Image (cartoon, helix red, strand yellow):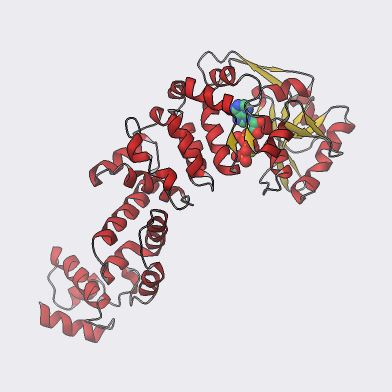
Amino acid sequence: LPEVFTAALPVLKKINEAGYEAYFVGGSVRDLLLKRHIHDVDIATSAYPAEIKQIFEKTIDTGIKHGTVTVLYGGESYEITTFRTESGYQDFRRPDHVTFVQNLSEDLKRRDFTINALAMNVDGNIVDHFDGLGDLDKRLIRAVGKAENRFHEDALRMMRAVRFMSQLQFTLEPETEQAISDNHELLSKISVERIRDEFVKMGIAPGSQKAFQIFLDTGLFEEVPGFKGKKENLALYPQLNFSPTTEANLWALMIILLKLPNEKIAHFMRIWKNSNAMERQVADIVGFFDLISSRAPNNYDLYKAGLRTIVSTIDLANILGQPINGRALVDRYEALPIKDSHDLVVDGHFLLKNGIPAGPRVGLLLEEIKKAVLEGIVSNNEEAITEYIALNN
Ligand code: ATP
Ligand code: MG
């Protein structure tokens, strides 16, 4: 058993000793059986939140109303959630009522996919009411119960389906796929932030080309910001050499496939509710990609782009099957005499002291000096630069 589980076993035992049931549930059990990396374990229990708080010394009220208490134990934190069912879902996205229940099977029934509806007790026995084990074997994403109903309850599950396809490199069970096709419009009820999180997870995982094909075929793509009517552009995605590995490159790729002009990048990033930092990073990558697609970058271009953007852009070019000598670009960057303005031996004060009048000329001249240093016309030392100023001013 991986360390994350053995570390959590005493937590389950303590709950059991207090007279309640406790299981590992959801993603961690799935990933254990698939021998995938496990980031955190979730625990489900018959105990009420108040009872969990009595068993453990250190707890945090994470979501008492939904039955979740975070327990701090042995230097780790665990989300412990009371068995519950959900009902209502009038708005296609969240249950109107959460009801605590006494048995595990009711709790497993509310979960999205069969492979996510597995539980494991302290002895390592697996509880599997929906043949999740069979689906793990067949590598299938299948809704628990009638897919149509499950997507009516919570339309985000349709995005989760394609996200898990991509992350696990699984196929979508045909009825589940049909239900997504029939109900894709319901995705419009879900907040952009939640769609974005699933979209990004889908996009940066190894199976993203196949998942993206389903995202297109089922019509889900029509319900997300900026994609409606763009099927032809997006159809290139499933043919890519491999998946982007970073969120910034996923967005850059989308912008390139959608052929968005520069002035529309900010708007596109904003309708997806991306942060300003992400927006800037993506604009830099797209800008540098356009540059290297049109001409050989000079040293000043490399300096302005910076290593992170250069490396991302090389990845992007590879994903798009565009031939580019990435190693050579990185080597050239590494060899630059200056990597940022602090590396330049002179600054604005130096120019003022050397007779340049205060004003916009100072900044422009500094930029000129940088270019000259980067192109190897001037050495990065005060004497050489002073001489350069005298000759060029
Ligand atoms: P990850 O590795 O991304 O954390 P996960 O399976 O743990 O994958 P979570 O979003 O953390 O996914 O959810 C934990 C569990 O809660 C899921 O395995 C599933 O059983 C249940 N679950 C989460 N979201 C939903 C949902 N929208 N509808 C039904 N069940 C859900
Ligand atoms: Mg999880």
Q: Quick check: 209 left or right of 127?
A: left
In front of the other: 268 or 215: 215
The x, y position of residue 203, in whole percent, is: 48, 43
- Residue 61 appears in the figure: no
The x, y position of residue 356, in whole percent, is: 13, 73
The x, y position of residue 64, in whole percent, is: 67, 25
Q: Quick check: 108 left or right of 1?
A: left
Position of 27 relative to 39 (above/below): above
Residue at 33% in and 77% down: 337
Q: Quick check: 143 left or right of 222?
A: right
Position of 49 relative to 261 (above/below): above
In front of the other: 349 or 45: 45
Q: Quick check: 150 left or right of 107?
A: left
Residue at 33% in and 37% down: 232
- Residue 371 appears in the figure: yes
Answer with the quarter of the image where residue 51 lies: top right
Determine the quadrant in which ligand 2 lies: top right
Q: How many marks?
A: 0
Residue at 70% in and 42% down: 77
For the C terminus, which image quadrant?
bottom left
Position of 277 relative to 346 (above/below): above
Residue at 82% in and 32% down: 55
The x, y position of residue 214, in whole percent, is: 48, 34
